[in-house]
Structures are given as C-alpha cells and as structure tokens.
Amino acid sequence: KTTLLNLVDGLDRPTSGRVVILDRDTTRLAPDELTTFRREHIGLIFQQFHLIPYLTALENVMLAQYYHSQTDREQAERALEAVLEGVDAVIHLASDKGVGDADVTGTDRLLAAAERAATGHVVVISIIGCDRIPLPFYASKVRIEELTRASRVPWTIVRVAQFHSFVERLVATPAGLPLPIPIIADLRFQPVD
C-alpha cells in the first residue's frame, strides 16, 4: 500500500511503466510541475488523524471548533465536506494492525462524507481471500467491502496479496514464544514477492 501511495502522489518513480492520473503521465512531469499537480489534484488523509473514535466525523470537527470558541454545526458540516469537495477519486488505504473496528468505522465515516461531497469515486484496498480466511482482521476487511458496496458513491474494491515477510512473521512469532501457542490449522495466504 505504501508503494502504491508513493507512486500515486509522485514521491516515488516506477522502475518501469507510467503513472497516469487525470490523463497526465506524472512520471514525465518536472519537479515543480509535479508539486503543482499534487497540490491541485491529490489529497492525502493519513491513517492516524487522531479523531475521537466514539464521535462522528462532524462531531470531531465541532469539538475542534469548541476549543476555538466556535460551535456552529453548519460551519462544521461545510468544513468536513470541503475536504472531499471536488475530489475525483479517493484511494482508501487505511489499515489498522488490530482487529480492525477503527477501520470499519473510519471507512463508514469516509463513505458518508464522500457521498455528501459528491466525490467521483472511492477505491478501497482489501486483501485477496479475506472472505474465506477466518481471522478477525480479515473479517473487518469484509465488513469494509460490504459498507463500500452499500454506499451511494461509485466504488472499486481492489484485493491485493500479502507479502511473504508478513506471512513469515505471522507464523514465526508464536514459534518464538516460551509457551506453546495453538495455530489455526487451516491458515491460507496468497502472498506475493
């Protein structure tokens, strides 16, 4: 996901091929042109945006207003929707390393804001086989896909494979513990090099 994000925002260049966004080959842009293109067409919302999890996105904006002596709900709604207003596409790469409830609620909030702002398209990155592998993290990916399909925003779900290093770490970690840890016998992965 990090590599994809870095290619989309122009921080990395592909070793071969092109990156085309809005009919422009960003791999051929000069640094100052890329900076302008990024500023005008690419927005990044980082995974750790430190929202209060039990508040809605709107309530989080209003909380910030409260500390600045402004609690106008209409103003908060406009500020929240302004983030996504005029955005052609949102690529949702967020992934909590835990069970994933924060991912599910975060995705729900993102889709609701994208719908209100009439965002053109949402791309959600998921995992190959998440609907067939009985792990809580994968179950959250399935819930995110369900929310995405149920939204009124045009969407694409891209399922990617996991890296060998992740699978190795998942299997090797229990082996290094002093006590025997049961491992699910039917773990299946589709890693990629």
Image (tube, rainbow, N blue to C red):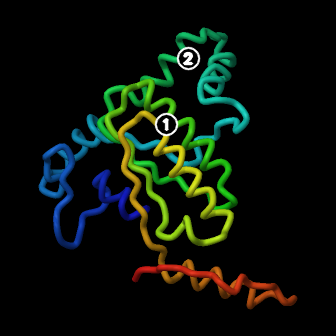
Question: Is 54 placed left or right of 61 in the picture?
Answer: right
Picture coordinates of residue 22 (x, y %)?
A: 18, 43
Task: From the viewer's perspective, tell me whether residue 69 is left or right of residue 81.
Answer: right
Front residue of 37 and 106: 106
- Judging by the rendered image, the residue that carries numbered circle 2 is 76
Q: Residue at x 42, y 67 (%)?
A: 160
Q: Looking at this view, is 100 or 147 the one in front?
A: 147
Give the residue at x 49% y 65%.
127
The one nearer the camera, 122 or 87, is: 122
Q: Considering only order in the chain, which callout, 2 or 1, is on the residue closer to the N terminus? A: 2
Q: Label 1 to label 2, Cα distance in Å?
A: 17 Å
Q: Position of residue 182 (x, y in %)?
A: 80, 85
Amino acid on which the number 2 mark rests in the picture: Ala
Q: Is residue 109 above or below residue 141?
A: above
Q: Position of residue 29 (x, y in %)?
A: 14, 51
Up-down relation of residue 59 to residue 184 (above or below): above
Mark 1 belongs to which amino acid?
Leu
SS label for mark 1: helix
Give the answer, above or below, for where 86 lies relative to 68: below
**x, y percent for residue 62:** 63, 19
Determine which residue is flagged by label 1.
111
* Mark 2: secondary structure: helix
